[in-house]
Structure formats: C-alpha cells, structure tokens
Image: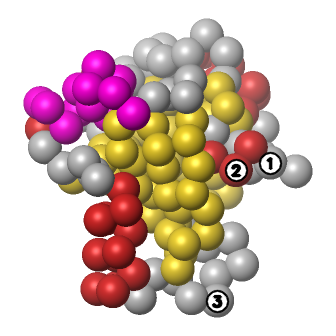
Amino acid sequence: MSQESGARVAAVVTAIDHVGIAVPDLDEAIEFYQETYGLVVAAVEVNEEQGVREAMLRVPGDDGTGTAIQLLAPLTPDSTIGRFLAKKGPGLQQLAYRVADIEETSEALRAKGLKVVFDEPKHGTQNSRTQFVHPKSTGGVLVEFVQPAD
C-alpha cells in the first residue's frame, strides 16, 4: 500500500457506506437479496456516466445511516462493471467508505501518494459524490469514498 510515513487523511471516514457487488442481471439479483436475506430496496437508478444500473439495498428499518449492499449491473459489456464481470465473474467489486467532504478526502489521498481514479469526484448513487482509489494503492481492494447528498 502506497503512503508516506506519518501522513494522515484529513477527512476521516464516518462509516462503511456500502459494499458493491457486480451482478449480470440486476432484477434477478434484487429478487435474490430480498427473498434470501430480507433486504429492502432503498433506491434503483441508472448512472450513464459510470455505465451501470444499480440498486442500494438495506436491512429493514435502516434509515440510510447503516451499511448498504450496492448491486451493480453493466449497461454495456465495455463498461467498468461489464469488464469486471467478463474478467472475474459476479462478486465483490468494491468497498465504500462514507466521508463528510469528498474534495478534502481526494486531496488527502493524493497527498499520501495513492492513485485516485478521477481528477474530480463523480456523481454517485442518490446524488452522492464519489471518488475511487485504484486497487494497486490499497492492497488489491477497489476503495470508493462517498459523500452523501445533503
């Protein structure tokens, strides 16, 4: 893991926001997670910019502050999730941490020498703002940082 000794991320993680799971068929996956685990759909949307149709699922009664399961299905085979599925098959794709300030977090990560994926944070689920850190900087795990919408 790349990081300068003694450097510290200025914006602290406030929660584990969600775990992202790549799936070939979103509707089929939603049904499985509902029927098997009793999870409830909090949101379903299309993110054209990131090439996915996605769903956020939560445990019953979660007000949105708990950890969600994000199901990600590709819009096209050449999207990030499409390529992930072709290479690795369905499964765990990323771990997302919640932060208060995505800009501050992005700068702090860059200052630590981590490879941040986007020059500027991107639009995420439910109008959040997101930034990713390349797995080569994080011991093989694609890490997402999420600033929820106000």
Can residue 147 be seen? no
Q: Would you place residue 51 above or below residue 65 in this image?
A: above
| Quarter that holds the N terminus | top left
- The magenta segment is 75-87
Q: Amino acid at mark 3?
A: Gly
Number of the label disc, if any, that sits on residue 45: none
Disc 3 to disc 2: CB gap under 8 Å: no
Number of the label disc, if any, that sits on residue 126: 2
Residue reaching furthest to the right: 150
Side (left or right) of 140 relative to 89: right
User: Badge 3 local density, few (<14 within 10 Å), some, or many (20+)?
Assistant: few
Q: Which residue is mark 1?
A: 149
| Residue occupying image coordinates x 75% and y 28% | 104
Spatial CA distance of label 3 from label 2 is 18 Å
Percent x, y of residue 22? 30, 47
Q: How many marks?
A: 3
Number of the label disc, if any, that sits on residue 61: 3
Side (left or right) of 50 relative to 90: right
State the residue in front, 8 or 110.
110
Q: Does the magenta stretch mainly form a helix, a strand or a loop?
A: helix
Q: Amino acid at mark 1?
A: Ala
State the residue in front, 140 or 35.
35
| Residue occupying image coordinates x 31% and y 65% | 29
| Residue occupying image coordinates x 61% and y 69% | 42
Say whether disc 2 or disc 1 marks the residue closer to the N-terminus. 2
